[in-house]
């Protein structure tokens, strides 16, 4: 075996990474103590970026494709190592593969209630949860700011920071959107858009970007939910007077169908009396106008000349001016009728 064969056996001539996980963001290629051969084949798959690091300094970045490593396609590495033209010896460098695909269906939620000011309910506390997706958009920034020198960097290493940023900006997003608490459920998409606008500028310093943000649920405080239920019930009931009458009638019907009936002692009697009073009060509200209208209609008499109604006590007819007698007259025959008579004694007309 020649000297070149020995060197070739101690050098790497193929560099690639097949991601077998679902959460790896950065993978450091394992050199296993070997050097990289000049002319080695570098394969960067779709949704990957390869970065060469020389003695802690970021060097050349390779987008998806197949490359034969030469000084011509490694200008930064060539400058850092001061390679001369035609350099053909193995060299040392760290190679990092960055996963740029989307990481989907990641969960977020509020560990503690988020305070917000609502125009109708004042200060209220909200709880919310949902999911989001993100991807690496600036591999160089991610490597400088987050990754360090570890061999791998996963979703779990960065999602905590993203979640905290999301939750801390959620209340600001709700306030800026000016969506009332009662209307939040109908505006999840609009609110999610506000959150994306607020969060993305703050995670850009990590080299990542949220590509999707979904709100699955926003839980209102218990007292606010009760107020919503009462408001909904009022809308369904409509006319409270009719509803009260209906309830009273239903209560009497159920009592009548009860085997013990209204004859039961103790609480049963008390309940029956109370329901009866409620029913009477409810019915009286509708019957009172008719009862009040009856005396008004019966008051007064009719003019014997024109037959028009004449107010009680009037001396002349307000329609034709005919002088009226002290006693009422029959509207049919015009003859006087004794006070208090129910029928005309002359023609029998009901008064």
Image: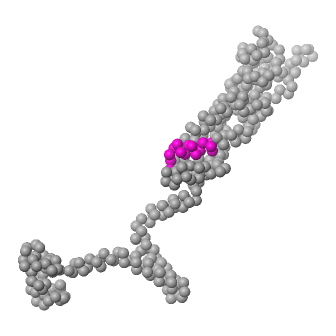
Q: Position of residue 68 (x, y in %)?
A: 74, 18
Q: Which of 146 and 21 is in front in this view?
A: 146
Q: Is residue 326 above or below residue 133?
A: below
Q: In which quarter of the image is residue 27?
A: top right
Quarter holding the N terminus?
top right
* Residue with the most extreme top position: 85
Q: Is the magenta stretch mostly helix, strand or loop?
A: helix
Quarter holding the C terminus?
bottom left
**Residue 178 horizontal side relative to residue 241, left or right:** right
**Residue 117 horizontal side relative to residue 159, left or right:** left
The region drawn magenta spans 166-181
Q: Where is residue 238 in the image (x, y as percent from the top left)?
A: 42, 65
Q: Nearer the viewer, residue 213 or 85?
A: 213
Q: Quadrant of residue 335?
A: bottom left
Give the residue displayed 65% in from the left and 46% down from the top: 108
Colour option used: one colour
On whether residue 167 falls in the magenta region, the answer is yes
* Residue with the most extreme bottom position: 345
Asked if one can make out residue 17 in the rendered structure from this viewpoint, the answer is no
Give the residue displayed 75% in from the left and 17% down from the top: 77
**Residue 224 horizontal side relative to residue 36, left or right:** left
Give the residue displayed 14% in from the left and 89% down from the top: 338
On whether residue 241 falls in the magenta region, the answer is no
Q: Is residue 108 above or below residue 75?
A: below
Count of all numbered marks drawn on residues in the image: 0
Q: Position of residue 66 (x, y in %)?
A: 71, 23
Q: In this view, does 224 lie above or below 20?
A: below
Asked if one can make out residue 130 in the rendered structure from this viewpoint, the answer is yes
Q: In which quarter of the image is residue 168?
A: top right
Give the residue displayed 66% in from the left and 46% down from the top: 107
Q: Where is residue 284 in the image (x, y as percent from the top left)?
A: 36, 78
């Amino acid at each position: 075996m020649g000297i070149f064969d020995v060197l070739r056996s101690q050098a790497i001539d193929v560099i690639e990474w097949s991601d077998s996980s679902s959460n790896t963001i950065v993978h450091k290629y394992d050199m296993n103590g070997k050097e990289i051969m000049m002319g080695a084949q570098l394969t960067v798959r779709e949704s990957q970026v390869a970065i060469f690091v020389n003695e802690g300094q970021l060097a050349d970045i390779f987008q998806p494709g197949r490359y034969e490593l030469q000084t011509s396609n490694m200008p930064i590495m060539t400058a850092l190592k001061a390679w001369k033209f035609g350099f053909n010896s193995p060299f040392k460098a760290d190679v990092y593969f960055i996963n740029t695909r989307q990481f989907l269906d990641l969960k977020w939620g509020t560990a503690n209630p988020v305070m917000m000011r609502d125009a109708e309910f004042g200060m209220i506390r909200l709880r919310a949860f949902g999911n989001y997706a993100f991807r690496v958009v600036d591999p160089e920034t991610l490597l400088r700011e987050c990754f360090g020198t570890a061999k791998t960097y996963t979703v779990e290493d960065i999602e905590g920071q993203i979640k905290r940023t999301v939750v801390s900006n959620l209340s600001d997003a709700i306030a800026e959107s000016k969506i009332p608490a009662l209307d939040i459920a109908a505006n999840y998409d609009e609110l999610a858009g506000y959150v994306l606008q607020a969060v993305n500028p703050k995670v850009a310093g990590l080299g990542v970007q949220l590509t999707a943000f979904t709100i699955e649920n926003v839980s209102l405080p218990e007292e606010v939910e009760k107020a919503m239920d009462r408001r909904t019930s009022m809308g369904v009931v409509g006319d409270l007077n009719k509803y009260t009458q209906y309830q009273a009638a239903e209560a009497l019907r159920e009592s009548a169908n009860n085997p013990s009936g209204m004859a039961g002692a103790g609480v049963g009697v008390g309940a029956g009396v109370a329901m009866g009073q409620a029913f009477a009060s409810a019915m009286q509200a509708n019957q009172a106008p008719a009862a009040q209208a009856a005396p008004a209609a019966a008051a007064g008499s009719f003019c014997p000349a024109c037959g028009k109604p004449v107010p009680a006590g009037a001396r002349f007819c307000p329609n034709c001016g005919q002088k009226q007698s002290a006693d009422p007259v029959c509207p049919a025959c015009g003859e006087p009728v004794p006070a208090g008579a129910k029928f005309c004694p002359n023609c029998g007309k009901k008064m």
